Image (tube, rainbow, N blue to C red):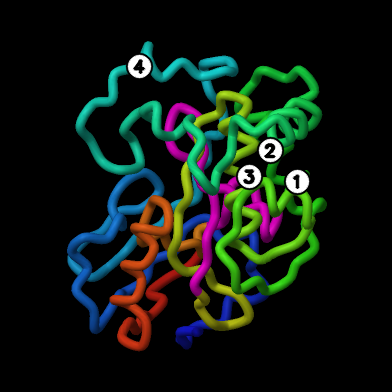
């Protein structure tokens, strides 16, 4: 499913640092549109690509030393859930741990590791549409998939190294249209969007986050399908 764009930004892929869009025909309450790189005013969404990708901590991140304060989705410090394995994000599996350590190569700077993971996952996985629900171990072994496979593997590898990571889903502009897409966010003293599918670190501002979380939350995107229209107001 794709959403027509009133502006074709194909030639600007990877370079757009600021995007303003107007979202129409859907109720926006309940979506994760506000926080971090995104700000919402009425029906107008502003996305700014992160210009700071450095962190003051070293890996592994100790969630127990940082209080999770109330705040916007993009600024609140990560809790233990962003480091923990899940049935699909098997961050404690020996195969995931071994691959993660090999990629990191002993590096403890989070921003360096996050960049390495982005490039490694992009190069490792053959791009292919997949209809199944992916798990990180399956993706590592099969070596192929779409944005969901790239994201679940990235998040598992990151968590295995003590780098807080979570799944974001929403829309991305490709070829003059907006498509539903998934990508990781990692904690670099603020949540930073990265895209191993498109090999972008950080991800450009043409990524519009609607939700954060696993499958239980992602099904909420059904509220948008066939209803959402959007107009690009400005891009730079």
Q: Is residue 111 left or right of residue 184?
A: right
* Residue at point 78%, 50% (across, down): 141
Q: CA distance from mark 1 to mark 3?
A: 10 Å
* Residue at point 68%, 38% (across, down): 115
- Which residue carries the number 3 mark? 154
- Which residue carries the number 1 mark? 119
Counting residues from the N terminus, which is met first, the one under dot 2 or under dot 3?
A: 2
For the magenta stretch, what is the residue range? Answer: 180-204
Nearest the eye: 125 or 174: 125
Look at the numbered disc 1 and give the secondary structure of its residue: helix
* Residue at point 51%, 45% (across, down): 87
- Which residue carries the number 4 mark? 66
Is residue 198 highlighted in magenta? yes
Residue 91 higher or lower than 46, as above or below: above
The x and y percentages for residue 66 are: 35, 16
Counting residues from the N terminus, which is met first, the one under dot 4 or under dot 2?
A: 4
Are the two marked residues, 1 and 2, in contact with CB atoms closer than 8 angstroms?
Answer: yes
Q: Is residue 170 left or right of residue 181?
A: left
Q: CA distance from mark 2 to mark 3?
A: 11 Å
Q: CA distance from mark 4 to mark 3?
A: 23 Å
Point out which mark residue 115 bears. 2
The local crowd at label 3, few if under 14, some if 14 to 19, many if 20 or more residues have their Cα within 10 Å, is: many
């Amino acid at each position: 499913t794709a959403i027509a764009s009133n502006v074709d930004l194909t030639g600007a892929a990877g370079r757009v640092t600021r995007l303003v869009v107007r979202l129409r025909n859907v109720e926006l309450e309940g979506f994760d549109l506000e926080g971090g790189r995104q700000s919402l005013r009425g029906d107008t969404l502003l996305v700014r690509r992160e210009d700071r990708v450095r962190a003051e901590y070293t890996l592994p991140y100790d969630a127990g030393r940082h209080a999770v304060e109330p705040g916007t989705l993009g600024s609140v410090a990560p809790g233990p859930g962003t480091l923990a394995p899940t049935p699909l994000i098997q961050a404690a599996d020996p195969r995931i741990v071994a691959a993660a350590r090999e990629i990191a190569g002993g590096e403890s700077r989070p921003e360096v590791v996050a960049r390495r993971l982005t490039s490694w996952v992009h190069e490792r996985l053959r791009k292919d549409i997949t209809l199944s629900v992916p798990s990180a171990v399956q993706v590592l072994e099969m070596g192929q998939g779409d944005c969901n496979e790239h994201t679940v593997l990235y998040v598992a590898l990151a968590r295995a190294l003590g780098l807080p990571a979570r799944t974001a889903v929403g829309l991305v502009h490709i070829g003059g249209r907006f498509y539903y897409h998934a990508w990781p966010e990692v904690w670099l003293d603020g949540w930073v969007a990265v895209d191993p599918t498109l090999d972008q670190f950080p991800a450009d501002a043409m990524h519009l986050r609607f939700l954060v979380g696993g499958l239980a939350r992602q099904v909420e995107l059904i509220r948008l399908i066939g209803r959402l229209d959007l107009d690009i107001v400005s891009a730079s």
